Image (tube, rainbow, N blue to C red):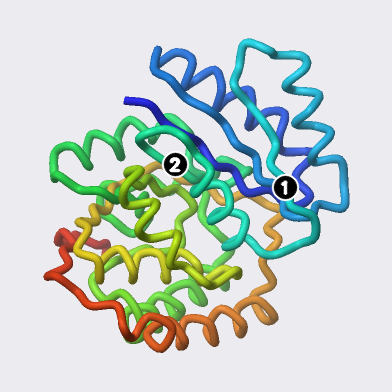
């Protein structure tokens, strides 16, 4: 089946050449239709030019850059790209490829096995392989944030923040057309809406490596994300649930 790959990018000129090469070569090898949409979230560097140079140097790969001017936030960038994809599956992944693009096949296989419309990479599962861990303080804060997620938004999901998620086209339109958060809590909002609409979500063990150069400030962005997290139920209080489904998880101790 065909896939649109969405890569949100803010000041990613250094990472993008290797990421675009790896992503394009992988999907080209699958022999299915695909497109790669880099969403430039108001970068101050040469992000857009790097994508243009890649397109010119590799016309065999369907890569393009989407821009809207100004820095709107990762949530806005992902939403912008997901709703403009044209293929049956929509994958969004981070520009650093902390989750290798080859994990796409594993997530899709799990979605097909479970009849799920949403497949998400999940780092805490027992079979996941964390090849390079985050600094200890980020892991501690991450666990605290997940407890807040469990309490306020999407209980039963072990990892809402891994930047590797696949939605079917129908689920993409239903979910992302309703999303409102532009910041880093957008994953939680999208999963909350998906569950309320009755879409089945499957969590899939993945390979993952911490990459230096994160744009996330643990203090500034952390506080804003917690605030946004607390607003999700209010924003979507009129959204009724027809028995949403989330598959059971097996997390590490």
Taking the spot 29% from the left edge, 51% from the top edge, the residue there is 118
Horizontal side, residue 79 vs residue 245: left or right: right
Q: Position of residue 156 (x, y in %)?
A: 23, 71
- Out of 29 and 48, give the one closest to the viewer: 48
| Residue with the most extreme right position | 45
Q: Which callout, 1 or 2, points at the residue further toward the start of the chain?
A: 1
Taking the spot 63% from the left edge, 32% from the top edge, the residue there is 19
The mark total stands at 2
Q: Position of residue 199 (x, y in %)?
A: 22, 58
- Out of 251 and 153, give the one closest to the viewer: 153
Please tell me whether mark 2 sits on a helix, a strand or a loop: strand
Taking the spot 60% from the left edge, 17% from the top edge, the residue there is 61
Q: Position of residue 99 (x, y in %)?
A: 48, 42
Residue highlighted by disc 2:
91
Horizontal side, residue 175 vs residue 66: left or right: left
- In the rendered image of this protein, does residue 219 appear above or below residue 201? below
Disc number for residue 40: 1
Please tell me whether mark 1 sits on a helix, a strand or a loop: strand
- In the rendered image of this protein, does residue 15 appear above or below residue 153? above
Q: Where is the C terminus found, in terms of image quarters?
A: bottom left
Q: Position of residue 95 (x, y in %)?
A: 63, 43
Q: CA distance from mark 1 to mark 2?
A: 16 Å
Residue 131 in sight? no
Taking the spot 75% from the left edge, 31% from the top edge, the residue there is 51
Q: Residues within 10 Å of mark 1 (few under 14, many from 20)?
A: many
Q: Residues within 10 Å of mark 2 (few under 14, many from 20)?
A: many
Q: Quadrant of residue 198?
A: bottom left
């Amino acid at each position: 089946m065909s896939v649109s790959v969405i890569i949100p990018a803010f000041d990613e000129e250094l990472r993008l050449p290797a990421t675009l090469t790896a992503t394009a070569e992988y999907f080209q090898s699958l022999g299915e239709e695909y497109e790669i949409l880099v969403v430039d979230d108001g970068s101050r560097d040469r992000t857009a030019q790097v994508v243009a140079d890649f397109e010119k140097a590799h016309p065999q790969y369907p890569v393009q850059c989407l821009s809207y001017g100004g820095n709107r936030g990762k949530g806005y960038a992902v939403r912008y790209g997901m709703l403009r994809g044209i293929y049956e599956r929509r994958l969004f992944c981070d520009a650093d490829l902390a989750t290798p693009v080859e994990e796409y096949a594993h997530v899709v296989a799990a979605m097909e096995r479970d009849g799920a419309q949403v497949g998400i990479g999940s780092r805490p599962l027992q079979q996941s392989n964390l090849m390079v861990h985050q600094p200890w303080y980020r892991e501690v804060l991450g666990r605290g944030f997940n407890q807040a997620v469990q309490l306020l938004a999407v209980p039963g999901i072990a990892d809402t923040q891994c930047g590797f998620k696949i939605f079917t086209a129908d689920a993409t339109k239903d979910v992302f057309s309703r999303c409102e958060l532009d910041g880093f809590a957008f994953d939680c909002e999208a999963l909350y809406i998906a569950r309320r609409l009755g879409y089945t979500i499957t969590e899939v063990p993945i390979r993952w490596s911490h990459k230096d150069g994160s744009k996330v400030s643990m203090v500034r962005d952390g506080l804003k994300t917690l605030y946004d997290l607390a607003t999700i139920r209010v924003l979507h209080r009129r959204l009724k649930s027809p028995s949403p489904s989330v598959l059971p998880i097996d997390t590490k101790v």
